[in-house]
């Protein structure tokens, strides 16, 4: 091996990037050549100098901050319009002609639905003059097929409620929440009616009688099962006013663990913290909080859970 | 591929050990199906090393955090296109390296050399020191702090690709073959970049050796 060859390979030799045969040839040459040994020593000294570059310190605070910022950016990415564009509308993205066809179809569909509903709207409008009554018998009520609930208005002065609904005819029920007829309609509304605004108003009306077992059960049901996050949140607020019990605690824990909406989960963790401060922290709650402090998809929920874990020392 | 980059990923002591390949593959598949928790778990295997690499490249914590975020957002957007033909770590570090290269190119376009942030009241020593500066005071040069600064300066004068190759080879200890895979280039091209970088650095820092 010539000195020039060795000079070319010296860098690779120090990095351990030569084959064993190449390495042996280099070592043999170095053993016999003082000039090349000197060159190697110089390169080794140079590497020692490079090792004096300060090591970049990644502090736990910087890492946590970077992770938090990334989480927030990913949340925006996941739930923002970009996600819709990326995940929901691939046809529009790649095939403008298909997008146009889809748009046209939607317009025609909307027009068709509007035209089809026209006779029903006219019929409803024609029946608006039906008499109001507060005197509806139980059998009347049970036989009614409610087609529309147009208003649930609590009366703070009397503690009663006024419900306007359409069955075979338009009816306005007015009375106390203790009245079984009123309760029956409101419990139907909160569990089964398809308008979330009405369900929310109904929950608002029911709050004042949350200690009634039927109403209590309906509030918990709405918190667990209502398809609308706003209604679940309203129900959760009402459930928090219930007297502490295992079913309330379990429902809150379930909301924290399973609700798809981060706002509901945040409200649930707040409610659990408040009840835990009074009642103490049981093992399933402590475990759930500890797990969600690292696994919940929402950074604020994780933050809240982590704070709770620190607070209760489990 | 032989997991070279995974070795690199596990170099940092505080970073959790990489999951087994089966675990990692499962996380990748779930992340590709939109499972955010799986994506989070997957990037936690590498994110500390990525942040450290970004810190070495840009010097400032704020910029390193931005690069970290930019890199992982790109990974998130494109993970569904990842095919298991390559190691995930190689693919990930390719994304990270491209983000770092873009940053270095933007920086060199602006003709700014940003190093470690100055201490309070300290002059902006790192800002574009001219080439014809006088030789440093030997007493100051004797301090390791000063040597560290000069090394950072010399590294910043390399072109972006030489800088990244040198960083990955010399400081991160990757094999040339792995760097070639990350850079999507031949091992010989990586060697050439490494030689050029070494030569330039020796010229700049020769008086310290």
Image (spheres, coloured by chain):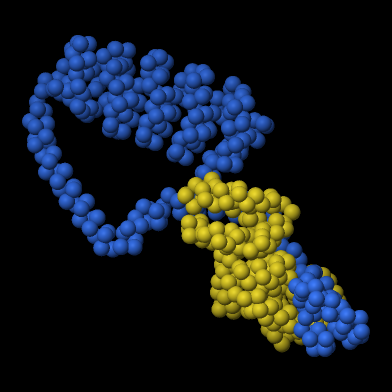
In this orientation, does residue B60 appear? no
- Front-most of residues A92 and A144: A92
Q: Colour of chain A?
A: blue
Residue drawn where x is 76% and y is 66% of the image:
A54
- Front-most of residues B22 and A76: B22
- Front-most of residues A97 and A170: A97
Residue drawn where x is 40% and y is 24% of the image:
A221
Which x, y percent locates residue B71? 55, 61
Q: Is B188 above or below relative to A134?
A: below
**Quarter of the view holding residue A120:** top left
Which x, y percent locates residue A165? 20, 24
In this orientation, does residue B19 appear? yes
Residue drawn where x is 84% and y is 80% of the image:
A25
Which x, y percent locates residue B70? 54, 61
Q: Is residue A82 left or right of residue A150?
A: right
Which x, y percent locates residue B4? 68, 62
Q: Quadrant of the C terminus of chain A?
A: top right
> Which chain wears yellow?
B
Q: Is B188 above or below relative to B29?
A: below
**Quarter of the view holding residue A293:** top right
Residue drawn where x is 59% and y is 77% of the image:
B108
Q: Quadrant of the N terminus of chain A?
A: bottom right
């Amino acid at each position: 091996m010539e000195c020039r060859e060795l000079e070319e390979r010296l860098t690779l030799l120090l990095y351990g990037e030569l084959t064993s045969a190449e390495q042996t040839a280099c070592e043999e040459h170095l053993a016999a050549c003082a000039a090349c040994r000197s060159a190697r020593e110089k390169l080794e000294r140079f590497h020692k100098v490079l090792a004096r570059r300060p090591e970049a310190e990644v502090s736990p605070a910087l890492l946590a901050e970077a992770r938090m910022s990334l989480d927030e950016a990913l949340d925006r990415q996941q739930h923002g319009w970009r996600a819709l564009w990326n995940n929901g509308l691939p046809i529009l993205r790649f095939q403008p002609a298909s997008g146009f066809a889809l748009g046209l179809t939607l317009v025609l569909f909307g027009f068709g639905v509007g035209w089809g509903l026209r006779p029903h709207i006219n019929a409803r409008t024609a029946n608006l003059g039906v008499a109001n009554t507060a005197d509806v018998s139980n059998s009347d009520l049970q036989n009614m097929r409610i087609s529309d609930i147009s208003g649930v208005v609590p009366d703070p002065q009397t503690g009663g409620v006024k419900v306007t609904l359409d069955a075979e005819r338009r009816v306005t029920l007015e009375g106390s929440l203790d009245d079984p007829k009123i309760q029956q309609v409101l419990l139907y509304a909160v569990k089964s009616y398809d308008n979330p605004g009405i369900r929310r108003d109904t929950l608002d009306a029911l709050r004042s009688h949350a200690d009634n077992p039927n109403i209590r059960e309906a509030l918990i049901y709405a918190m667990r099962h209502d398809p609308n996050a706003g209604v679940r949140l309203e129900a959760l607020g009402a459930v928090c006013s219930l007297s502490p019990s295992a079913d309330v605690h379990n429902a809150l824990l379930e909301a924290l663990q399973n609700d798809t909406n981060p706002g509901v989960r945040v409200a649930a963790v707040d409610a659990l913290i408040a009840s835990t401060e009074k009642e103490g922290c049981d093992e399933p709650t402590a475990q759930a909080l500890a797990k969600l402090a690292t696994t919940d998809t929402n950074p604020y929920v994780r933050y809240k859970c982590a704070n709770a874990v620190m607070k209760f020392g489990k | 591929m032989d997991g070279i980059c995974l070795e690199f990923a596990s170099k940092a002591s505080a970073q959790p050990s990489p999951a087994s390949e089966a675990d990692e593959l499962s996380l990748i598949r779930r992340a590709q199906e939109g499972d955010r928790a799986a994506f989070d778990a997957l990037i936690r295997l590498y994110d500390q090393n990525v942040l450290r690499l970004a810190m070495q490249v840009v010097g400032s914590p704020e910029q390193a955090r931005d690069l970290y975020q930019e890199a992982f957002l790109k990974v998130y957007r494109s993970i569904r296109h990842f095919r298991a033909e390559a190691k995930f770590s190689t693919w990930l570090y390719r994304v990270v390296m491209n983000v770092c290269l873009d940053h270095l190119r933007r920086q060199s376009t602006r003709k700014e050399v940003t190093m470690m942030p100055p201490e309070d009241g300290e002059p902006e020593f790192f800002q574009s020191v001219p080439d014809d500066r006088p030789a440093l005071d030997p007493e100051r040069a004797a301090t390791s702090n000063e040597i560290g600064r000069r090394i950072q300066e010399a590294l910043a004068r390399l072109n972006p690709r030489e800088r990244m190759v040198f960083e990955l080879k010399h400081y991160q200890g990757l094999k040339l073959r792995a760097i070639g895979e990350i850079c999507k280039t031949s091992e010989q091209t990586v060697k050439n970049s490494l030689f050029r970088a070494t030569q330039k650095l020796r010229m700049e820092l020769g008086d310290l050796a």
